[in-house]
């Protein structure tokens, strides 16, 4: 139904009150579980002494967060600050050679950090995929790119390559997989864009300039070659009104979020608790639902902050990088679910949209989603957990289309047309609430464990039925309706009068 399906104001206030109360209730359960079990033996490795001011231990279970904002914070800041200063100076001196300057600094930083063997490996990947790109056959680019990606994701090839470059410090194995993986995906983007170029070919130097842009090199996000090439070679380097103010505001916002998350980790051990299944089995259904939801929210916050820091640097370089992912709270359909917008944009452009086209044909959509999640599985690293995650998310994406197709035929379409827009929105909200928890359960298994996801699903859907099941769906329904209201208001701001009546008489006269 249309975006004008507004609900009464008092109804939205009621939804807000129910949602706020439920979040506070679940948060209190998690806080109690964290405080009462802080000295458990199972918590010893992941709950460490925190800030002196709080006098409490801190959840340090997420290595990636601690790496970015604690253990290797100074190294990352040093590298990014050096890039900003180096890029700014030489951009003022030689704006036409910005991409070359970016690549030179990035190449030197990678060489110093990882050594000449890693550099040789990455350049060899570039040479292989550039050679294939000259043939201008997309299937060959995909075959070469995915084979190269498989070489760092599958045994025994990945262990052999990793042994060439690892050694001197703890972060090197992570930088190896991140650097090689993102490099190969960028090379594939270059190759596929070269196939679409009608006259001539892009040069090998264009590929190196694209691939060795340091802020994106190790941790992403991926920016497709066509966008990067156009923006990096733009010599009209002007700022929009208040752009520097917005960049500064976002940087301060990221800093504030980092501090808030660290404070929360002193009181809510949302990452450590799910790893202790003995404790998890003793928790209430409300606490389990809160844990599952909060883990996905945290993963979104982590992605938003990490990509946000990198994007701030890229924006200073006059680039328009992929934005952080959409908040998990705002998601109630599988079609919009992703935690890395760069990878999502890459997959949509070269696989999902390319095969699925308009996404209105059941068979094409099935083929498109299977191919998309096949590539995603290889990107994440094939294993049992990734297979399960890919299967259920692929199923969810297709099931949405099947349900939409089913309810678009009579008599369902006639019944929906006869009811008011507000009632249609309420009914759709019920299905969206159930879909939201399918998204949560299908994705929490990749963040925590299969055992934790199975326990949450069993407790909420089966053992907790009907009280826990209906309570969780009611709270989720309230959240979905608030999200729909926000989307409605944003749509009206973008197009205040989306349906304009046509004056037939005037049209005929003209």
Image: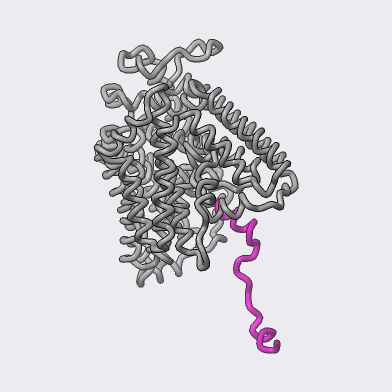
Q: Quadrant of the C terminus?
A: bottom right
Does the magenta segment cover residue 502? yes
Which quadrant holds residue 138? Answer: bottom left
State the residue at coordinates (40%, 31%). Answer: 174
Residue 287 position (above or below residue 211): above
Which quadrant holds residue 382? Answer: top left
Does the magenta segment cover residue 128? no
Residue 458, x across and y down, in percent: 26, 37
Magenta residues span 487-510
Residue 352 visible in the current orientation: yes
Left or right: residue 206 versus residue 22 is right
State the residue at coordinates (42%, 41%). Answer: 122
Left or right: residue 499 versus residue 128 is right
Residue 342 vs residue 215, the one in the foreground: 215
Residue 265, x across and y down, in percent: 47, 22
State the residue at coordinates (54%, 56%). Answer: 226
Residue 221, x across and y down, in percent: 50, 43
State the residue at coordinates (31%, 45%). Answer: 150
Left or right: residue 107 versus residue 354 is right
Left or right: residue 75 versus residue 492 is left
Residue 312, x across and y down, in percent: 61, 38
């Amino acid at each position: 139904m249309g975006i004008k399906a507004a609900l009464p104001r008092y109804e939205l206030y009621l939804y807000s009150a129910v949602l706020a109360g439920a979040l506070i209730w679940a948060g209190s359960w998690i806080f109690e579980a964290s405080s009462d079990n802080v000295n458990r033996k199972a918590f010893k490795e992941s709950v460490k002494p925190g800030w002196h001011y709080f006098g409490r231990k801190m959840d340090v279970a997420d290595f990636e967060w601690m790496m970015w904002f604690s253990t290797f914070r100074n190294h990352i800041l040093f590298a990014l600050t050096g890039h900003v200063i180096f890029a700014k100076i030489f951009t003022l001196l030689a704006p036409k050679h910005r991409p070359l300057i970016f690549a030179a600094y990035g190449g030197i930083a990678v060489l110093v950090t990882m050594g000449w063997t890693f550099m040789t490996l990455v350049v060899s990947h570039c040479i292989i995929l550039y050679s294939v790109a000259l043939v201008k056959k997309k299937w060959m680019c995909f075959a070469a790119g995915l084979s190269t990606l498989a070489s760092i994701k599958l045994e025994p090839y990945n262990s052999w390559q990793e042994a060439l470059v690892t050694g001197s410090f703890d972060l090197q194995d992570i930088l190896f997989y991140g650097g090689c993986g993102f490099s190969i995906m960028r090379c594939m983007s270059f190759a596929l864009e070269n196939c679409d170029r009608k006259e001539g070919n892009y040069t090998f130097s264009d590929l190196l300039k694209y691939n060795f842009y340091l802020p994106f090199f190790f941790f992403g996000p991926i920016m497709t070659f066509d966008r990067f090439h156009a923006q990096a070679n733009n010599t009209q380097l002007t700022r929009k009104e208040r752009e520097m103010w917005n960049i500064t505001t976002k940087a301060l916002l990221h800093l504030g979020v980092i501090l808030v998350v660290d404070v929360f980790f002193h009181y809510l051990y949302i990452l450590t608790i799910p790893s202790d299944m003995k404790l998890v089995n003793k928790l209430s259904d409300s606490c389990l639902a809160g844990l599952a939801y909060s883990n996905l929210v945290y993963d979104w916050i982590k992605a938003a902050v990490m990509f946000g820091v990198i994007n701030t640097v890229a924006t200073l370089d006059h680039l328009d990088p992929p934005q952080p992912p959409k908040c998990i709270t705002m998601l109630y359909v599988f079609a919009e679910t992703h935690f890395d917008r760069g990878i999502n944009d890459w997959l949509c452009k070269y696989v999902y949209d390319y095969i699925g086209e308009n996404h209105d044909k059941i068979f094409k959509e099935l083929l498109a989603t299977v191919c998309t999640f096949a590539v995603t599985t290889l990107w994440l690293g094939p294993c049992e957990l990734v297979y399960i995650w890919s299967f259920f998310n692929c199923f969810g994406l297709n099931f949405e289309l099947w349900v939409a197709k089913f309810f678009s035929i009579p008599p369902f379409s006639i019944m929906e047309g006869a009811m008011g827009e507000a009632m249609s929105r309420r009914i759709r909200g019920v299905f969206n609430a159930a879909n939201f928890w399918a998204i949560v359960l299908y994705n929490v298994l990749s963040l925590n464990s299969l055992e934790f996801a199975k326990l949450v699903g069993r407790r909420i859907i089966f053992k907790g039925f009907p009280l826990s099941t209906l309570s969780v769906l009611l709270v989720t329904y309230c959240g979905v309706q608030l999200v729909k209201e926000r989307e409605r208001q944003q749509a009206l701001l973008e197009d205040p009068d989306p349906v304009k009546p046509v004056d037939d008489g005037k049209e005929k006269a003209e």
